[in-house]
Image (cartoon, grey):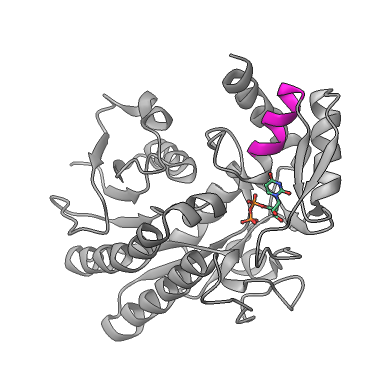
Amino acid sequence: MGKEKVLITGGAGFLGSHLCDRFIKEGYHVVAMDNLLTGDIENIAHLMGHPDFEFQHHDVSKYVHVSGKVKYILHFASPASPIDYLKMPIQTMKVGSLGTLNCLGLAKDKGARMLIASTSEVYGDPLVHPQTEDYWGNVNPVGPRGVYDEAKRFQEALTMAYHTYHGLETRIVRIFNTFGPRMRLDDGRVLPAFISQALRGEDLTAFGDGSQTRSFTYVDDLVEGIYRLLLSDYAHPVNIGNPDEITINEFGEEIIRLTGSKSKIKYFDLPKDDPKQRKPDITLAKKVLGWEPKYTRSKGLEPTLEYFKKKVLG
Ligand code: UDP
């Protein structure tokens, strides 16, 4: 009997490619779909030629076809860093709306279970701290980040509609800042920016006064949380993230120390609507998935630094 099929959109991206690895390891046949707008074929090069792996170069915002039975669909395609979705606002909105609609239609047709990649951005610049799943958020729909935040909020609403109206099996993960090997060096996010600057001996570019906070999750922990959520019977949104909160200033100092760099931190304007604080409340994930992060930030930074050293220093 053939293996059960999993479709992973954004399969050549940072998170998508790690999910491809996990599902191959779990004994599935993986179809990775990506239009390579922000994804990189190098992230899945090691899977090419594997008998249980196929790559479809396709934009999920256009009609999606996958042959045969499909067990699971994981919709991870989207520009996901602030500079990417500022550069590609329409594509970001299309993949979150039309892309989600196409995946949901496919899931309905195939009787597949569908998991969507939502985000802590649905909380916007949060007025509740730490963020619980029942907080509705503080998002500026017409601000620069609105294209991503509102696409993801629409994505959640559409997914719940398919769940309640069509009885489709759906799962919603709200992903907090995640890091690890295969992040794009130039995606503009704070971790690749700081690490590459520190390795090159350049000043670190902190935005604002650096007092804003984030909570960073190592990618293997995230993948484990997503896998557990997919197999669970919980259809409402679940936060997956590491609650260890740090200011951007402290994070810069940590990167300088870990890389042994002589770089200093320099300050630049804070981008509009940049959230001042972010930290997941993971009570729900603990309760319904028995999940909590296993990697401390420093443990996760070890393989991440190795990866970036190869990229930056060759
Ligand atoms: N940031 C920074 N310097 C950079 C890139 C980002 O100080 O070179 C800040 C950014 O303003 C934000 C935080 O780091 O407050 C995290 O930004 P990132 O783009 O990684 O993701 P976000 O959590 O904002 O989606």
Most common secondary structure along the magenta stretch: helix
The residue positioned farthest toward the left in the image shown: 67
Residue drawn at x 64%, y 71% as measured from the top left: 284
Residue 246 at what x, y percent from top left? 81, 53
State which quadrant residue 145 falls in.
bottom right
State which quadrant residue 170 falls in.
bottom left
Reply above or below: 193 against 114.
above
Residue drawn at x 63%, y 60% as measured from the top left: 290
- Relative placement, left or right, of 79 versus 71 is right
- Residue 311 or residue 179, whichever sits in front: 311
State which quadrant residue 214 falls in.
bottom right
Q: Quadrant of the N terminus?
A: top left
- Residue interval drawn in magenta: 192-201
- Relative placement, left or right, of 230 versus 135 is left
Q: In which quarter of the image is the C terminus?
A: top right
The residue positioned farthest toward the front in the image shown: 269
Residue drawn at x 84%, y 47% as measured from the top left: 249
- Residue 288 or residue 124, whichever sits in front: 124
Residue 256 at what x, y percent from top left? 83, 31
